[in-house]
Every structure is written in C-alpha cells, then in structure tokens.
Image (cartoon, rainbow, N blue to C red):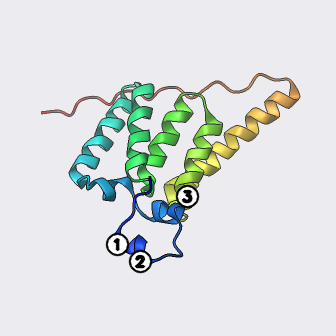
Amino acid sequence: MAITTGTARSQSSTSGADFVDRTSLKQILDISDAAMDQAMAIAYQLYLTGRFAQAEVVCKGLIACDHRYWWSHSLHASILRRLDRPDDALTAVEEGLKHEPGQPKLISMRAELQSILARVAYATQSGESPPPPAKAPRTPAPAAP
C-alpha cells in the first residue's frame, strides 16, 4: 500500500520511491521535534553507558523516522564502530552523506573508517593480527552541583 498525499497524487511522474526519499516518516506520522529530541538523547545516553545494542535499536528508529538527518547516521556509525563492525559503520556514514553530502562530521568519520578498514585489510594480507576494536567510551563524571 502506497502512502500518498495531494502533492504526490498531482505529480503523476513522481514515483513512490521519490516520494518516500523526500518525505520522512516523521512528517507522515507528525512526530514532534520534542519527541525526536528525547529519542536522540536516549540513544546518546545508551551509547555513553556502553549499551550499544539498545542504542543501535533507538538509532534505527530515529533513522526510520527521519532518514535525512545526519546526526542519527553519525551516532549509528559510532555505535557500529564500537561493536567492531567498521564495514557497517562506513555504510551508515555513506547513507548519511547521501542526504547531507557536505556534513563535516560525516566526512571526517568516513575518512577515519576508511583508514581503519585499510589497516585491517593490510594486516590481514600481511598475516598480522588486525588492530583491536575501539574501547567503549568512559561515562563522563556527573556535573558538580
């Protein structure tokens, strides 16, 4: 079943894929910015506390709601990197760059992940053991009262 709006119906040359690419689930379901901000905060807190599997689930939900926002792709890539999945992390970054090609954080992450993958490939070819996975970040100290 296709989701259509008056705009999409009036443009007969617009395919369903184009409509979905330009329209986020956030807009279709009318999810508030405040709800999205809360979900982003939860995802980030899960990431900071090392609960990467749960953080990944929340990130996937954020991306499903608004696939065009770079931050969700950035955090998702960071989580995947911590889970020692650099190939998947690079894919997440590339997906974010499709929607915001000039985003500096994503560009930096892409270069870093490409470097990691190149080192792993070199180590594998030369018979060395690949570098260890990145360590989980430390939880920041609580703010002073």
Vertical relation: 103 (above or below) 112: below
Label 3: which secondary element: helix
Image quarter where the C terminus lies is: top left
Q: Where residue 56 sits in the image (x, y, percent)?
A: 44, 33
Vertical relation: 75 (above or below) 46: below
Residue occupying image coordinates x 38% and y 74%? 7
Q: Is residue 18 left or right of residue 72?
A: right
Give the CA distance from mark 3 to mark 2: 30 Å
Where residue 86 sits, quadrant-wise, is top right
Q: Nearer the viewer, residue 116 or 35?
A: 35
Q: Amino acid at mark 3?
A: Leu
- Are circles 2 and 1 on residues that touch, CB within 8 Å? yes
Q: Where residue 108 sits in the image (x, y, percent)?
A: 57, 53
Q: Nearer the viewer, residue 90 or 5?
A: 5
Residue 10: which numbered mark, if any? 2
Q: Amino acid at mark 1?
A: Gly
Q: Where residue 76 sits in the image (x, y, percent)?
A: 48, 41
Label 1: which secondary element: helix
Q: Amino acid at mark 2?
A: Ser
Vertical relation: 73 (above or below) 102: above
Give the CA distance from mark 3 to mark 1: 29 Å
Judge depth for marks 3 and 1 and give the one in front.
Answer: 1
Residue 6: which numbered mark, if any? 1
| Residue at the spot of label 3 | 97
Label 2: which secondary element: helix
* Residue 100 in sight in this render: no
